[in-house]
Image (spheres, coloured by chain):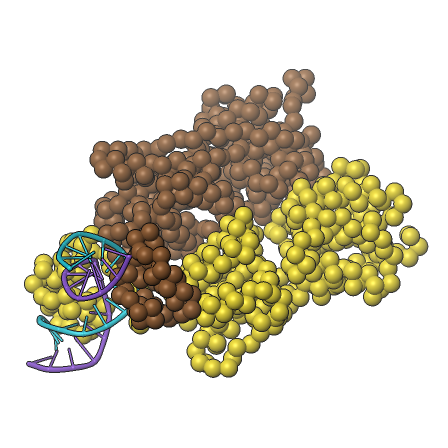
Chain colours: A yellow, B brown, C purple, D cyan
Amino acid sequence: MATIQDIAKHAGISIATVSRALNKPEMVNVETRERVMHAAKKLNYFANENTKLSNVKNKKLSLGIIIPYITAFYFGELYSGISKVAEEHNIDLLLYELKSQHMSNEGISKALSFVKQRMVDGIILASCHVPGDYEDLIEQVQIPIALVLSSHENGKLPAFKVDDIRSSFDAVAYLVSRGHRHIGMISALPTEPERSEQLRFRGYKQAIDFYNLPYSDSFVAFGDMRFDDGYVAMKQLLANNEKIELTAVFAASDEMAIGAMRCIHDAGLRVPEDISVIGYDNLSVGTMTTPTLTTIEQPFGQIGSESVRHLMKVLTDSGQVTGKGNFYLPHKIIERESVSEITLSAK
Amino acid sequence: MATIQDIAKHAGISIATVSRALNKPEMVNVETRERVMHAAKKLNYFANENTKLSNVKNKKLSLGIIIPYITAFYFGELYSGISKVAEEHNIDLLLYELKSQHMSNEGISKALSFVKQRMVDGIILASCHVPGDYEDLIEQVQIPIALVLSSHENGKLPAFKVDDIRSSFDAVAYLVSRGHRHIGMISALPTEPERSEQLRFRGYKQAIDFYNLPYSDSFVAFGDMRFDDGYVAMKQLLANNEKIELTAVFAASDEMAIGAMRCIHDAGLRVPEDISVIGYDNLSVGTMTTPTLTTIEQPFGQIGSESVRHLMKVLTDSGQVTGKGNFYLPHKIIERESVSEITLSAK
DNA sequence: CTGAAAGCGCTTACAG
DNA sequence: CTGAAAGCGCTTACAG
């Protein structure tokens, strides 16, 4: 590896001038500048970026992004939103993938250390539920943190997301507006109560109460968000259905909704004629299923952009722009074919 | 930011000892060690990892991974394969996403510089077609490069992938074994001839010739690999089909295959009774479509692992383990429901 | 077991 | 416009 020392020797000048020629070419004589460039090319010089980053003083602003599963369908859109604003503000991005098996407190702590040790100025924590007792660690890193697609029990951290309860309420409201009253749900496995997927169940339940709809525990089945889980959960609902007669099902993810549709099909029933299905996510495959899938869409790009803007404000307004609690961004219902209209006479 | 200087002061010892206490605890007295640990905790110390990385000497081995689209469906599996072996060998990974708009030569050159400047010891270049005239740049970086899911025109670089031609040949052969003779293809848009997706068309064509099957240009339609593209391409094949009577279609991606199935459905025909469909990729959604999708699977994990093993060998065997050309890993046909058996009498 | 000192590759006031 | 020198935060022979 060639260094600026080598270039200096080769060009017969000092390392100070080499450094200037490389980074602030306008500060050096044209002729020497060219000697440097020539030597650099000849010696195959690549600047050691780690050294530059190591000097805390003259470093660009940078943000660490921590995400549990980089291949999540929404990651691309989220990241685009983040990097767009980051580029506008000329700030560096450092990505850290939390291996799902390390989703424990320990894993998050490791992730925070990782980015902190790379001297980032702020952190975006995506899809990680942060338990209330995390205060210590959060205080330790001493740089602003923004939550994205998740929230913090104590509300001490700003969180950018859609309102899961509200959007799920809206999904059910939509079904009601189409004449449905016996509405089931395929929900996430009940684990930590504050996770987004859990909130969707709460929204469902609130709507059930609000509209005074019939309900029993047998209206709900649980799954781990994937295709297969939706299939299995639907199978159970169908088994229960002998007596409960659901006409519509709200699934907490499109994957589960699609699994459910396949299950309904295998049972010799039709979507939406026999049972309507509404999903959550707006995966692109939802336009290709038969029927195409009605679903809830989140503005991932916008969520990403807002979180960066917020951190920038905190970082530059050198003061009291802390800001905490939830910042909700607007969700949307995507109407397609998987929900039918029930006329009063029908049921 | 606290530094080891601060700790040293606080604990009343030298920075050398602080450094040792932190990194080689067994080298220091238990008591001083604890003083250091205590001060570190109290001062909220985080080691500046960039500084460590900047010191070329005592650095861990590291690999740069360059990939055009981090949200590609196969990335997770590929990355798992890579990181598994990387962990075994205790080597660091640095990820760089090539923005698709920068897929130009310039973009790749920037990506190579980026990782090179972070002092990686080797590079894995995924899904990037490397044109033959790249010799210069490749020589410049002076560290080993392995291609993954792509290849190099001159064959100067080692490439880890499945044999696209062979696997596509096999897809057609499978259809033939089920009695099909009028076989169409939905292929990638013809751009650079060496891209994997292009090779799939060649494999299709070779099989057509090998089995002496009927063929005309109207057997083939083109698309850009996504759901919609498959739908549109299938529409065209169906329009052509008035006269050509295809009984099966091979799509260069599962997304296009699923789009095609939806199109066939919309045309009032059935898969596989009227037309069989075989895809390429083995997306998980293929188990939930109706019918479930028969397809070709690539061993992404294995491909990733092998590429790392290869680089390790080159890096450590300090010598002539260069190795170039294509290293093919085995593909597999996943049989599901979208291909029917045609009896002789039928056609 | 510990400290003073040299070194990693680079940047930037400071003085010419 | 250029160079000598100090500094960034850290590590590690070398000497005690």
Residue A158 image position (x, y, % from top left): 57, 71
- Residue drawn 48% across the image and 53% down it: A97
- The residue nearer to you, when weighing B72 against B40, is B40
Would residue A179 be visible to someone looking at this image?
Answer: yes
Q: For the view shown, which residue lies furthest in the right direction?
A: A345
Residue A149 visible here: no
Compared with residue B166, is residue B95 higher up or lower down, i.e. above or below? below
Residue at (34% x, 61% y) in the render: B32
Location of residue B333 (image quadrant) = top right
Q: Is residue B82 left or right of residue A285?
A: left
x and y percentages locating residue A53 in the rendered image: 32, 64
Q: Residue B293, percent across and down?
A: 62, 35
- Seen at 52% across and 77% down, the residue is A322
Residue B251 is drawn in which quadrant?
A: top right
Question: Quick one: B34 or B196, which is closer to the camera?
Answer: B34
User: In the drawing, does residue A34 fall left or right of residue B26?
Assistant: left
Q: Which quadrant of the structure image shows residue A259?
A: top right
B224 sits left or right of A277 in the view: left
Q: Residue at x 77, y 46 (%)?
A: A271
B7 shown above or below B98: below
